[in-house]
């Protein structure tokens, strides 16, 4: 009996529904906000809402609401609580003191509880209202916002114009004037002027600023224009030129736009449509009214030319007579001569040798190529005409010529500044070691068709030169001797002194040579007596 009860207990205890409980539990946290008192309760089911109130000193443009849906809280309005601020929009004659939250200027923003002090600037200006105003928690000022009276404040807005620089200032009193300039692309027959009178702006003179007008556009031979943007040929109006039938536009731009200084672009040109017959080396055309036999024949629409082939075994494939259409195309496919080789093969960095050139080529004829300047090939490049097409007979490609390895120089080295692998047009630059300087006119060499150009440059040791006056002496150093000219290497120091009655050294006695060939301090001089310069080189 006791075991049966235990089994019954186990069955009942473990038959409880283990599914996920329904409802929303964890209340979402919203920055600077808290759940409204009316929304608070012990548990929430699907469809329940949470309304939030912003904390003191914060506000939101919309109510912040969450809804319980599918056991999860979902935000209904994506707003946030932002700090409330009071904004003081200052007129041009008004100033505010510096506050904890802002600075004087046209717009001052402060937090609730803060106070700003306002004042007026300018002749005859007085503050109408409270000087000190305090920001409330609702973002409003505690008292009506004051204003400055006694003068003109808000600058009048003039359509398509702006106040001239010479008229701009901080404040305006009765009698002051405002001059306006029309904006770019606009003009007025009169200067626009306003005057400050009885504390308000009154228009003194001037008409409105209207769009500038360009002169009537020029016509072009065999074409006409049409307006594609704007009207009445005023500023930014664009016109487009169109050629008559049988003519085509030859200019890069077919439009012109009215700018501040007139029409832009050049006047376009329409040229007669022509059909062009590009004849191969074995083709001829008869003489027409518009052209002559040759490699390129141009004829007007409606004209007909007759074509033929010249050379052993050549025949014309296609129509003998072809007529030019108004579109600049031929009325039938352009014919060709068959039974030989025509188009000369193009070989990279090479050209057909003069000895191989002729008017037409038959089967068995050969073409020899010469590499261009700066290029070379280990084998002669040759093509042969076989079965009416060109076939390569022998030869490798033309590659850039290579110069010998550059020579080194004492106390220097080279680096490649253009090109690579010391091939044609590669340029190297020589750089001297520290303590040495370039003495040659050119420090670069370039690989040319016949080798490296320029002479091999030279690096000489850097030396500091002390040019002594006749009354100056230096001690003997490791690198030089006493005399009118002392040369020392970088790092060396010489000691200078003056000789002669009443002479003193102005500057440092000891001077050291730097790696640049300059002294570490300004070169001293002897003062206080007559100073002479050596007239000849003397060594001590």
Image: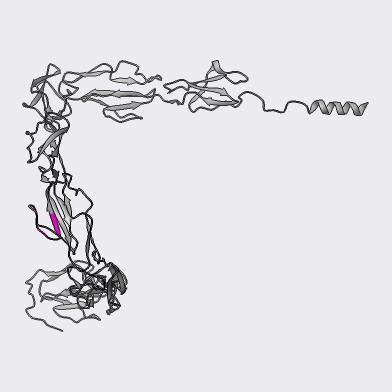
Start and end of the magenta stretch? Answer: 290-297
Whether residue 171 is situated above or below residue 506 in the rendered picture = above
Q: Is residue 423 left or right of residue 174?
A: right
x and y percentages locating residue 524 in the rendered image: 16, 69
Whether residue 376 is situated above or below residue 184 in the rendered picture = below
> Residue at 18% of width from left, 21% of height from top?
125
Q: Is residue 293 magenta?
A: yes
x and y percentages locating residue 331 in the rendered image: 20, 48
Question: Quadrant location of the N terminus?
Answer: top right
Tell me the quarter of the picture where residue 392 sits.
Answer: bottom left
Is residue 401 shown to the viewer in this render? no
x and y percentages locating residue 157 in the rendered image: 18, 24
Is residue 305 shown to the viewer in this render? yes
x and y percentages locating residue 418 in the rendered image: 27, 67
Q: Nearer the viewer, residue 14 or 538?
A: 14
> Residue at 10% of width from left, 81% of height from top?
537
Q: Main secondary structure of the magenta part?
A: loop
């Amino acid at each position: 009996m006791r075991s049966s009860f235990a089994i019954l207990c186990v069955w009942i205890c473990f038959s409880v529904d283990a599914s996920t409980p329904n409802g929303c539990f964890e209340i979402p946290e919203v920055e600077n906000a808290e759940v409204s008192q009316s929304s608070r309760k012990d548990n929430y089911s699907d469809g329940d809402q949470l309304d939030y109130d912003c904390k003191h000193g914060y506000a939101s443009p919309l109510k912040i609401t969450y809804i319980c849906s599918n056991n999860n809280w979902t935000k209904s309005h994506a707003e946030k609580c932002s700090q409330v601020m009071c904004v003081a929009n200052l007129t041009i004659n008004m100033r505010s003191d510096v506050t904890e939250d802002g600075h004087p200027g046209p717009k001052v923003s402060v937090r609730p509880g803060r106070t700003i002090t306002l004042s007026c600037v300018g002749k005859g200006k007085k503050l109408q209202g409270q000087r000190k105003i305090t920001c409330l928690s609702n973002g409003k000022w505690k008292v009506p916002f004051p204003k400055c009276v006694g003068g003109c404040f808000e600058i009048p807005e003039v359509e398509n114009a702006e106040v001239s620089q010479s008229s701009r200032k901080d404040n305006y009193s009765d009698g002051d004037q405002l001059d306006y300039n029309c904006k770019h692309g606009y003009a007025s027959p009169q200067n626009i002027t306003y005057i400050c009178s009885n504390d308000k702006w009154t228009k003194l003179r001037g008409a409105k600023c209207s769009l500038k007008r360009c002169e009537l556009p020029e016509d072009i031979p065999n074409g006409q224009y049409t307006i594609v943007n704007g009207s009445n040929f005023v500023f930014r109006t664009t016109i487009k030129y169109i050629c008559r039938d049988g003519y085509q536009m030859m200019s890069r731009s077919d439009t012109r736009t009215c700018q501040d200084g007139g029409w832009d672009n050049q006047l376009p040109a329409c040229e007669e449509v022509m059909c062009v017959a590009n004849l191969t080396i074995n083709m001829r055309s008869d003489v027409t009214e518009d052209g002559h036999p040759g490699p390129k024949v141009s004829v007007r629409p409606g004209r007909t030319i007759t074509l033929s082939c010249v050379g052993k075994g050549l025949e014309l494939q296609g129509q003998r007579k072809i007529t030019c259409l108004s579109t600049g195309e031929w009325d039938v496919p352009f014919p060709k001569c068959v039974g030989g080789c025509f188009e000369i093969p193009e070989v990279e960095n090479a050209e057909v040798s003069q000895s191989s050139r002729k008017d037409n080529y038959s089967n068995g004829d050969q073409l020899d190529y010469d590499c261009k300047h700066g290029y070379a090939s280990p084998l002669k490049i040759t093509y042969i005409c076989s079965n009416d097409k060109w076939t390569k007979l022998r030869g490798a490609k033309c590659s850039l010529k290579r110069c010998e390895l550059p020579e080194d120089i004492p106390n220097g080295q080279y680096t490649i500044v253009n090109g690579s692998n010391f091939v044609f047009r590669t340029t190297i630059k020589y750089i001297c070691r520290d303590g040495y300087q370039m003495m040659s006119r050119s420090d670069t060499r370039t690989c040319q068709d016949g080798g490296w150009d320029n002479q091999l440059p030279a690096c000489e040791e850097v030396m500091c030169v002390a040019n002594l006056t006749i009354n100056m002496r230096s001690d003997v150093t490791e690198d030089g001797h006493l005399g009118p000219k002392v040369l020392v290497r970088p790092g060396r120091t010489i000691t200078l002194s003056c000789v002669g009655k009443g002479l003193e050294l102005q500057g440092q006695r000891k001077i050291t040579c730097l790696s640049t060939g300059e002294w570490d301090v300004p070169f001293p001089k002897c003062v206080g007596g007559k100073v002479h310069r050596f007239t000849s080189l003397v060594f001590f």
